[in-house]
Image (cartoon, rainbow, N blue to C red):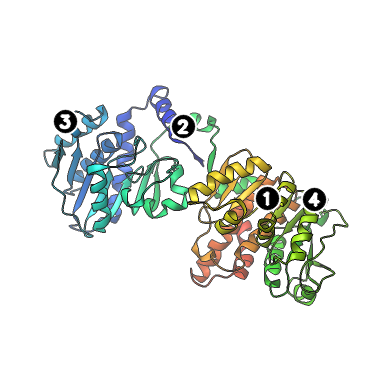
Amino acid sequence: MKIFTKEERAALDRYSVEEEGVSVSELINRFAEGVTAEVMKRLRPAQPVTVFAGPGNNGADALAVARMLIDQGVDPLVYLFNVRGNSLTRDCRDQREMLLATRRVRLIEIIDSMEPPQLSRDHLIIDGLFGSGLRNPLSGGFMTLVREINESGADVVSIDLPSGLFPDWNPNSISRNIVHANLTVAAEYPRLSYFIADNASLVGQVKLISVGLSKTYAADVPAKYHLVESADITRALRLRNPFSTKDDYGTALLVAGSYGMMGAAQFAARGALRAGVGRLLIHSARCGFNILQTAVPEAMFLPDKNDIVVSDIVINREYSAIGVGSGLGTADATVLALDSFLKKYRMPTVLDADALNCIARRPSMLNSLVPGSILTPHAGEFDRLFGQQQSAEARLIKGVEIARKYKITLILKGHYTAVIRQDGKIFFNSSGGPAMATPGSGDVLTGIVTGLLAQHYEPQIASVAGVYIHGLAGDIAARDLGPYSVNASDIADAIAPAIKSLLITRQ
């Protein structure tokens, strides 16, 4: 699904109205019907409802919702902010007149000042103060009102955006000056700011409502941001030829494991094998021989000359993909071995975990990255590599810069894991959840991505598909085991049913 910027979304709205004959009033009513339905689902009997409507089209949506709630027998108290008595947009004025025509509304129109409303956790609040048209951070009376809403503990449903949150980037935003919504309802497409970790406590759950925007125009917009869904991965995965052999599915090498951390190598290996790689070899410290040959008998073991760490990465056969880092450690000998490998062997590589920590110890290695390589840092690893970032948003912006500079793909792990391509496009993942916050989970991901890369998927496809499959496997494991008890082995075991579920519609 495309995630449109503020400007792209405004152009889509205009095209839908001007070229396809959908009136603004129709769009408002369709959206309001969807918002009203969501409100009715969560509304308790006799629960007080307060609607805050701003002067723009976000306020128009809120007034339409208030009117429809009245039709459902709800008695909302509506505050309409019409500063100086002349600030309403035409559509907001129209919705005000339609609301007044019901003759059953409690409407308070705020022109210059207001008495602070009495809000409590018993209330349901509909936040329609400001949406994508907001130009500056909230201040003055609106800032005070937002803080009162947040302090009330009420159930808050925001229309389009929590008031005070910008649709795209929010540099230097102050959380307490933005509405903290429990549910944000959007028309047709999500906003970029929904997917930034800094905003998770502001946006809450997200519900998309179909309103009939132009599908033709939307399809033609070359959006920079995307939300990855199951259908995208179903299309990307290739069906297997009945006459194929393991030679058709590539040969992968994992450079992984050191004394005390062979489990990480095992998880990466299981990820690669379940992702369908044709052959898998593991180069590891010599001490891992018995462990890995027992735990992953499908893989071949290549012992390092060192007993406890990887000290020399020798490539003496052709591989279609190499993954480096799981459980590798950061011993001096390992740092030197990785530096030598990156300089000597010019092939795209998946670099994760301790490979990234080794590079952080010797940043000059970044200049040896082969274009097309894939780096999979979590926030801490990213900051060690590229400098301390003050927010998840800053990390994404820096990630785009890094991906372009080194011509690599970055998998920035977290909720809505972001795959940042070298052309600057960002793909946010929609699968996975908190059950996956467990040791070894990232190693499984490294294996999946390496396994797909070995099967000759393009690096950007291997990254996006690998991240989605990994998250879906986590969802399947959590469904069976609950959110507390999933471990990396469970995620690895769930890769097979995850891929099977994605391909079942193509059988």
Left or right placement of residue 158 versus residue 347 in this view: left
Question: Of tags 3 and 2, which is closer to the observer?
Answer: 3
Q: Earlier in the sequence, mark 2 or mark 4?
A: 2
Tell me the amino acid under the disc marked 4: Lys
Left or right placement of residue 464 versus residue 93 in this view: right
Residue 7's spot in the image, x, y percent?
44, 31
The kind of secondary structure element at disc 2 is helix
What distance separates the C-alpha of mark 1 from that of mark 3? Answer: 56 Å
Residue 246's spot in the image, x, y percent?
81, 57
Vertical placement of residue 172 versus 413, above or below: above
Circle 3/circle 2 CB separation < 8 Å: no
Q: For mark 1, what is the residue?
A: 374
Q: Can you tell which quarter of the image residue 451 is in?
A: bottom right
Tell me the amino acid under the disc marked 1: Ile
Question: Of tags 1 and 2, which is closer to the observer?
Answer: 1
Circle 1/circle 2 CB separation < 8 Å: no
Tell me the amino acid under the disc marked 3: Gly
Tell me which residue sits at (72%, 46%) in the image. Answer: 367
Q: Earlier in the sequence, mark 1 or mark 4?
A: 4
Q: Earlier in the sequence, mark 3 or mark 4?
A: 3
Q: For mark 4, what is the residue?
A: 343
Residue 287's spot in the image, x, y percent?
78, 75
| In-front residue for pair 164/30 | 164
